[in-house]
Structures are given as structure tokens and as C-alpha cells.
Amino acid sequence: MGDVAITDLAVHPNSHYEPSTAAVTMAHLGQEQSFEQGAAQKTYISVSQPVPPFMNIEQAQPSDVPGIVSVLLEAEQWLASKGKSLWSATEIGPERVLRDVGAGLFHVARDGLQLAGVVKFELEDAHFWPEVPAGNSAFVHKLAVRRAWAKMGVSTELLSHARLLAKRAGRAHLRLDCMADREGLRNLYEGFGFTLHSIIPKGSASYARYEIQASSR
């Protein structure tokens, strides 16, 4: 699932993580420099720093597996320290990550030779979007940014990259979900231009499902 970086807000496996010491540590969904015009009237949390010009985003390779695991583990440990554990050891373990990298799902942001952030881009999500027709949408999961690169716009670039991948794949929408009571996170999605699709129950929790057109107009 995806991941957000928040400090004071609990996150869900489909949220997106970019830690910092601020109240909310992430600028989600690649939109700090490309907000949809209609969302500009509201105040959303966003990073102010531009993405470093030396940041490169590309599909992950098997040699990236240890680095991806490290990024995800850092995110999980940080959130767990706040009482907001996000993933199980199995979900972010080497075997699972190696499988996903082998399937071409992970993309990484590099700062020189250092791995600054990761995102998992998928073309199906039957768990949270079972009714979406095959071939219609793409989905963002495990987005995480190292603390050293927090508030530098890495997460937003990764999500913009995911939106571009969705467009290239011929998908009409990029979709994601988060727990419905995560107001700060939902503001971030909406500030990016995502539209609330629906709120659905899953177990004892409710989840807000969001979508955005893969092609900006």
C-alpha cells in the first residue's frame, strides 16, 4: 500500500510517508508546483523547497532492494515510535520487496548515488477498488522518503512521476486511499487535485478513496 509522511497524524498503509519535525511531514502527490487551479483557494500543507535539480527518478533495479527496504523500514520505525505503526515486517521485508522490484513495481528517487525515496506503482488494487474496470486506473502505494530529504519535495515528485506513468500506460485515473479520519492527509490529496470518490468501510475503519485524472487538463 502507499505511505504518507506525517508526524502528528496517524497514517494507513495506503497513505504516503515523508518524515520531518514539522506537524505534518509530507508534501504529498507531486503537486507543490502543479496544484490544480480549483484547489488553490484552500490552505494545504506543502513543502516550500524546490526539488533538487540533481534528483533522478527511475524504475528500481534488483540492486536497489536493500536500499528500498531501508527506506521503508526507516518510515515504519519512525511511525511506530509515534504509536502509528504502518507495515508488518513481511510487507517491507527483502523477499516481498525483491518480488515487487522484479515485477517492475518500485520506482526510486536518487540524489546522486543515494536513494532518497521510493514509490510503488501498480495497475490494479482489487482490495480497495474492486469495482474499477481492468485497464481503467493506476494506483499508488508505498511512497516513502528518507528523513534526510524531508520537506524537499521528493514525495511530490514521486507522485507526479506516478501520474505520468499512469498517463503513459493509458490509464484514465490515478487512485489511492487513506483512512477517512486523516484530515491533514486528505487535505494534501485534495490540494494536489485529487477528488473524493467515496468513503468505504473496511473492517472497523472507514477509508476515503480518491482519484485524479492521469492527464492534466
Image: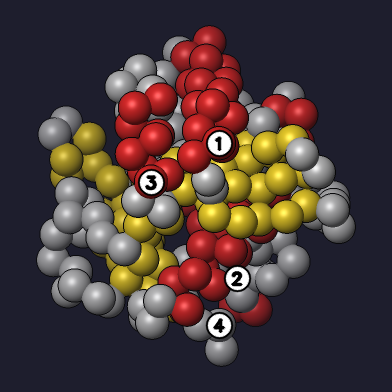
Q: Earlier in the sequence, mark 3 or mark 1?
A: 1
Q: What amino acid is labelled 4 in the image? A: Ser
Residue at image location 59% in from the left, 47% down from the top:
108
Mark 1 highlights which residue? Answer: 63
As helix, strand or loop, the secondary structure at mark 2 comes to helix
Q: What amino acid is labelled 2 in the image? A: Ala
Mark 4 highlights which residue? Answer: 216
Q: Position of residue 37 (x, y in %)?
A: 65, 79
Q: What amino acid is labelled 3 in the image? A: Gly
Q: Position of residue 17 (x, y in %)?
A: 55, 37
Mark 3 highlights which residue? Answer: 102
Q: Is residue 39 left or right of residue 100?
A: right
Q: Quadrant of the C terminus?
A: bottom right
Q: Earlier in the sequence, mark 2 or mark 4?
A: 2
Give how far apart the Cα atoms at labels 3 and 4 are. 30 Å
Mark 2 highlights which residue? Answer: 39
Mark 2–mark 4 contact, CB under 8 Å? no
As helix, strand or loop, the secondary structure at mark 4 comes to loop
Q: Nearer the viewer, mark 1 or mark 2?
A: 1
Residue at image location 73% in from the left, 50% down from the top:
153
For label 2, count other residues whose C-alpha is less than 10 Å away and answer few (under 14), some (14-19) or many (20+): some
Q: Position of residue 87 (x, y in %)?
A: 37, 25
As helix, strand or loop, the secondary structure at mark 3 comes to helix
Q: What amino acid is labelled 1 in the image? A: Ser
- The answer to whether one can see residue 5 in this image is no
Give how far apart the Cα atoms at labels 3 and 1 are. 11 Å
Q: Nearer the viewer, mark 2 or mark 3?
A: 3
